Every structure is written in structure tokens, then in C-alpha cells.
Image: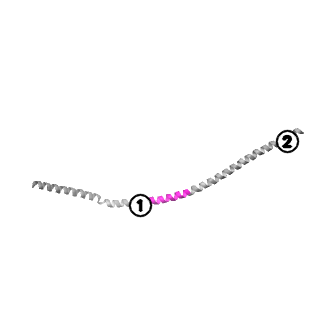
Amino acid sequence: MNEKSNNLIGLVITVLLIAVICAGIIYHYRGASGKLESELLKLERNNNELASETRQLQADVASHRTGITTIRNEVGKSRERIKHVYTEIEQAGNDVLRAIEIIEDCENIIETVKTQR
């Protein structure tokens, strides 16, 4: 009988130990639900702020993209103008060289006429 009593006491102690451990776990996590809800609300607020900032960033990027496209178009037009000016300068240089040749020819003619007199 003593052995049955020891087994029964061991069983009761084991059940009590399990009950105490379960009670401790329940006590520990009892307030966790409120904390979890609070953390979820913070997370939701952060998510909304992030979404708002993302939309603002997308709007800014679209605005900058438009500005960059405008600048790119203006640079293209300026490049064409520069090419045109360069072509005009080259043509003017050729005209100056031709004028110098004509002046030299005229000077040669004048010298020839002077020597013939």
C-alpha cells in the first residue's frame, strides 16, 4: 500500500507541477494580447506613413522625370543649334579663305600691271 501511496503522491506532485507551469505560462502571456494589439496598431500606423511617403516619392519622381525629359529635349535643340552655328562658322572660314585668295589674285594683278607700265 505504501508503494501505491508513493505513486499517488508522485502523480499528484507531477500534476501540480504541470498545473503550476501552465499557470505560469498563462500568467506570463495574459498581458501579451494587449501588447500585441498595441504593436499591431503601431505597425499599421507605420505602414500608413510609409505608404504616404511612397506616394509622395512617386509623385516627386514623376515630376523630376518630366523635368529631365524637358531638359533632354532642350539639350537636343541646343545641340542642333550648335551644329548649325559650327556649320556657319566653317562656311564663313571657307569664305574668308576664298576672299584672301581673291585679294592675293588682285594684288598679283596689280603688281603685274605696275610692272608692265
Q: Residue furthest left?
A: 1
> Is label 1 in a helix, a strand or a loop?
helix
Pick whichever, 17 or 91, lies toward us. 91
Q: Position of residue 26 (x, y in %)?
A: 27, 59
Up the image or down, 11 lies above or below 92; here it is below
The alpha-carbon separation of the residues under discs 1 and 2 comes to 95 Å
Query: In the picture, residue 50 is in which quadrant?
Result: bottom left
Residue pointed to by mark 2:
110
Q: Quadrant of the N terminus?
A: bottom left
Q: Residue sitting at 50 percent across and 58 percent down?
A: 58
Query: In the picture, residue 28 is in which quadrant?
Result: bottom left
Check the image and tell me how it is coloured: one colour
> Is label 2 in a helix, a strand or a loop?
helix
Count of labels in the image = 2
Q: Residue sitting at 19 percent across and 55 percent down?
A: 14
Callout 1 crowding tier (Cα within 10 Å): few <14, some 14–19, many ≥20: few
Q: Residue furthest top?
A: 115
Q: Earlier in the sequence, mark 1 or mark 2?
A: 1
Q: Is residue 74 magenta?
A: no
Residue pointed to by mark 1:
45
Marks 1 and 2: which is nearer the front?
A: 2
Q: Amino acid at mark 2?
A: Ile
What range of the chain is rendered magenta?
Answer: 46-65
Q: Main secondary structure of the magenta part?
A: helix
Q: Residue sitting at 61 percent across and 55 percent down?
A: 73
Q: Position of residue 102 (x, y in %)?
A: 80, 44
Q: Position of residue 61 (x, y in %)?
A: 52, 57
